[in-house]
Amino acid sequence: MPLLAEDPRFLYLAKPPGLPVFPPHGEPGGDCLLARLLAGRPEQEADWPEGFAGGILHRLDGWTSGLVVAARQPEALVEGRARFASHRLQKRYLFLSDGAVPWSEHAIDAPLAHDRRHKRRMVWRRGQSSPHRGRWLDARTAFRRLGRLGSHGLWEATIGTGVTHQVRVHAAALGLPYWGAELRPEQ
């Protein structure tokens, strides 16, 4: 069970890299953080709103490790989601990049949307005619250089919004692609 800590309203879960938060598409019984949570805490199987199984408040990409918060009651889920929606909760990410930029701190406000041709990719709004699918989602990411780890720059990204692939897309747009990632800035 991935439980790090708990209080009367929330469970704090450790998600390892490579493990999805929810079952993989086409594999409803596949290994995921939700399955591990329910195995250790069957009471979390309550009747949660769609998209919030187990009371899980938010997601992390499959290859990202970190803290995931789950509500213990429906009221706590509503409170937690309201905090995310009002940007009173922030997420912090650490990543490595070989990108060379002249600044140590920078913020980017650039809406994100799904790529017109590839539904799993996200693109950032570079102008009024940036090709996309669906609506633009507001997204702001603040970056801060923390130093070096070996030959790579160590960076911190802080977000109050939570758009899919937000940190990765904004980092690449600024010239800080994740070390080891094979992507263009618009992904």
Image: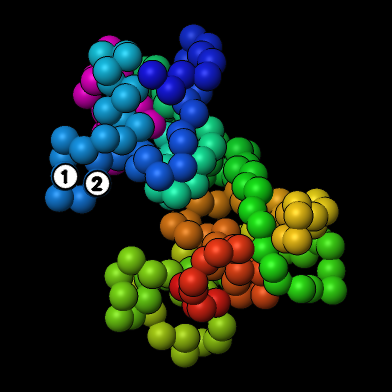
Provide residue 71's location: percent of width, then percent of height. 42, 23
- The magenta segment: 43-56
- Label drawn at residue 24: 2
Q: Which color scheme does this rendered protein use?
A: rainbow
Find residue 60 and report its image quarter: top left
Residue situated furthest bottom in the rendering: 129
Horizontally, residue 26 falls left or right of residue 41, namely: left
Q: Amino acid at mark 1?
A: Glu
Horizontally, residue 84 falls left or right of residue 19, namely: right
Q: Nearer the viewer, residue 151 or 185?
A: 151
Mark 1, other Cα within 10 Å: few <14 / some 14–19 / many ≥20: few
* Residue 117 on the magenta span: no
Q: Nearer the viewer, residue 138 or 36?
A: 36
Find residue 89 and report its image quarter: top right
Find residue 22 and report its image quarter: top left
Q: Helix or strand or loop: what does disc 1 sit on?
A: loop
Q: Residue at x 41, y 85 (%)?
A: 131
